[in-house]
Image: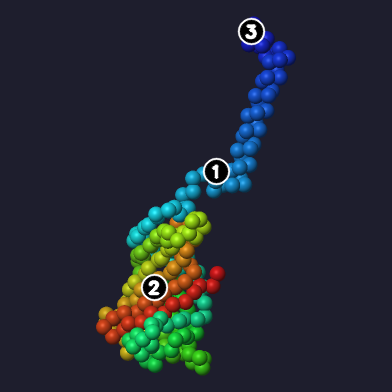
Amino acid sequence: MKHSQLLGHPNMKASHFKMIFKSVLTLSFALMILLLHPAKAYACACCAYAGQWFNTTQNLDSSVLERLNGLKFDQTANLYTTAAGLEETIIGITSPSESYTLSHSKNKRSWNFRFINQQGKTVGNLSFSLPQTFLSFGTDLYDKPTPDNRLYKEERLSGRITGSGIFTPGMTSDTQYTFITQGKDNNSCSSPSEHWILKVSGSKARYSFYGKFRQ
């Protein structure tokens, strides 16, 4: 029997129709899964996995600069101290306080942190430029059986810093800053944007501020 005759047979028509229907149904189901669960349809390139660790130097290009300049700082800047107290822990700040009201301003790569005391008076400024490169760090915390929050991440930026007001005593030619953003999630492609640290160090300076970002 010829092929055209086979297709014209009632049983063959029904069988051919069923095959087409099954193919269409399979493709429709696959498309539905892809649309509803795209992360499950493909291997998760950005997911964090057990034992993950990275420590890489990256360029601080225009896209990173735009992201960093979009960070919104909470109004409180806390001064890191230990049980020894402010006077023993802090070097390079005149009459340090445990916390200040923070006003952050930026102009492209130039950043300024203005510190305001409890009386509402500006007591000093810390100013620095964002570098050309930064360090991206991440590690599995090993403290959760589920992977929803397993990856701790940091971005670290370093360079020269200048200060005025209460920070003047600690400013010398070797005074440096390290600005750190911190975060924790299950996405190795995202950037940390939960907390921040600003460390200042030099021959006459040793102190660190910390705070959080507004989401």
Return the mark for residue 114. Answer: none
Decide if residue 53 is in sight here.
Answer: yes
Looking at numbered disc 3 in the image, what kind of residue is underneath it?
Lys
Looking at numbered disc 2 in the image, what kind of residue is underneath it?
Phe
Instruction: Tell me the residue at 38%/79% (across/down).
Output: 208
Residue 79 spot, x, y in % from top left: 42, 83
- Calculate the distance from the C-alpha at mark 2 to the C-alpha at mark 1: 38 Å
Looking at numbered disc 1 in the image, what kind of residue is underneath it?
Ala
Q: Earlier in the sequence, mark 3 or mark 2?
A: 3
Quickly name the residue at label 2.
179
Instruction: Tell me the residue at 37%/58% (across/down).
Output: 54
Quickly name the residue at label 3.
2
Instruction: Assign a secondary structure to mark 2.
Output: strand
- Calculate the distance from the C-alpha at mark 3 to the C-alpha at mark 2: 79 Å
Quickly name the residue at label 1.
41
Relative to 57, residue 194 above or below: below
Instruction: Assign a secondary structure to mark 1.
Output: helix
Front residue (pair 161, 119): 119
Instruction: Assign a secondary structure to mark 3.
Output: loop
User: Farthest residue toward the right?
Assistant: 10
Density class for disc 1 (Cα within 10 Å; few <14, some 14-19, many ≥20) is: few
Density class for disc 2 (Cα within 10 Å; few <14, some 14-19, many ≥20) is: many
Quarter of the rendering occupied by the N terminus: top right
Mark 3 or 2, closer to the camera: 2
Density class for disc 3 (Cα within 10 Å; few <14, some 14-19, many ≥20) is: few
Relative to 107, residue 17 above or below: above
Instruction: Tell me the residue at 63%/42% (across/down).
Output: 32
Quarter of the rendering occupied by the C terminus: bottom right
